[in-house]
């Protein structure tokens, strides 16, 4: 196959995929960022430098929902450099709690704090609301549009299960 034909097929395929994406105009929406702090501990067999097998156990967790970039009532401290508010730090597991989950032959590492964020856009579709996952750039675009009262044009992935892009209108 010639190089030009191959490139033409790629361009055609991309155009087909992009044209099959759903585009929506919405004026009622919420941009949410759910922030979660979770204590976790790694359990392993072998040395800490080269474990032959390892697994993770999660302990206490705390979650906070950010809506349209506004400070949630239970937020702890100031917003981070991405404008996200975080929950209070959950209680750190004690040594006894860590050892209680240890299996025979395993060693454990120190407790670590896992920070996670899940982004979503919710909007009205007919008489119901739809909530779809997204990523940080879309969340920020939606927050900025909500702050100025603008509608949004959403571009969904081909399967209509993820918001790929948001543009204020």
Image (tube, rainbow, N blue to C red):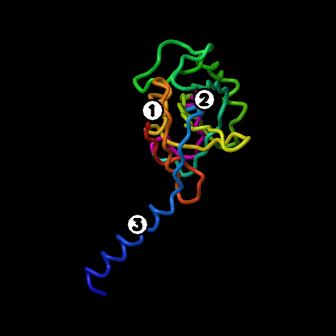
Q: Are marks 1 and 3 in contact (CB under 8 Å)?
A: no
In the figure, 144 relative to 71: above or below? below
For residue 97, which quarter of the picture?
Answer: top right
Q: Taking 11 as reference, is 99 left or right?
A: right
| N-terminal label among 2 and 3 | 3
Q: In the rendered image, which quarter contains the C terminus?
A: top left
Q: How many marks?
A: 3
Q: Which residue is mark 3?
A: 14
**Where does residue 151 sit, x and y in percent of width and height?**
50, 35
User: What is the secondary structure assignment of the residue under circle 3?
Assistant: helix
Whether residues under marks 2 and 3 lie with C-beta atoms below 8 angstroms apart, the answer is no
Mark 1 or mark 3: name the one nearer the start of the chain: 3
**Residue 79 image position (x, y, % from top left):** 47, 18
Residue at 40%, 66% in the rendered image: 15
Vertical side of 90 occupied by 12: above or below: below
Secondary-structure class at tag 1: helix
The residue at 70%/42% (across/down) is 104
Disc 1 marks which residue?
Answer: 140
Q: Which residues are magenta?
A: 32-49
Identify the residue under disc 2.
Answer: 38
- Single out the mark in the foreground, 2 or 3: 3
| Badge 1 vs badge 2, beta-carbon distance below 8 Å | no
Q: Residue furthest bottom?
A: 1
């Amino acid at each position: 196959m010639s190089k030009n034909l191959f490139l033409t097929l790629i361009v055609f395929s991309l155009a087909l995929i992009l044209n099959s994406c759903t585009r929506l105009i919405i004026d009622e929406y919420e941009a949410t960022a759910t922030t979660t702090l979770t204590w976790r501990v790694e359990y392993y067999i072998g040395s800490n430098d080269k474990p032959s097998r390892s697994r993770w156990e999660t302990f206490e967790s705390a979650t906070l929902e950010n809506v349209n970039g506004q400070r949630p009532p239970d937020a702890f401290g100031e917003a981070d450099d991405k404008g996200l508010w975080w929950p209070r730090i959950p209680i750190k597991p004690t040594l006894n709690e860590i050892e209680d989950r240890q299996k025979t032959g395993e060693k454990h590492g120190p407790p670590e704090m896992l920070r996670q964020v899940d982004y979503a856009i919710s909007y009205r579709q007919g008489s119901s609301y739809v909530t779809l996952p997204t990523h940080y750039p879309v969340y920020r675009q939606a927050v900025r549009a909500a702050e100025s009262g603008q509608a949004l044009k959403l571009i969904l992935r081909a399967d209509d299960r993820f918001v790929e892009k948001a543009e204020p209108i």
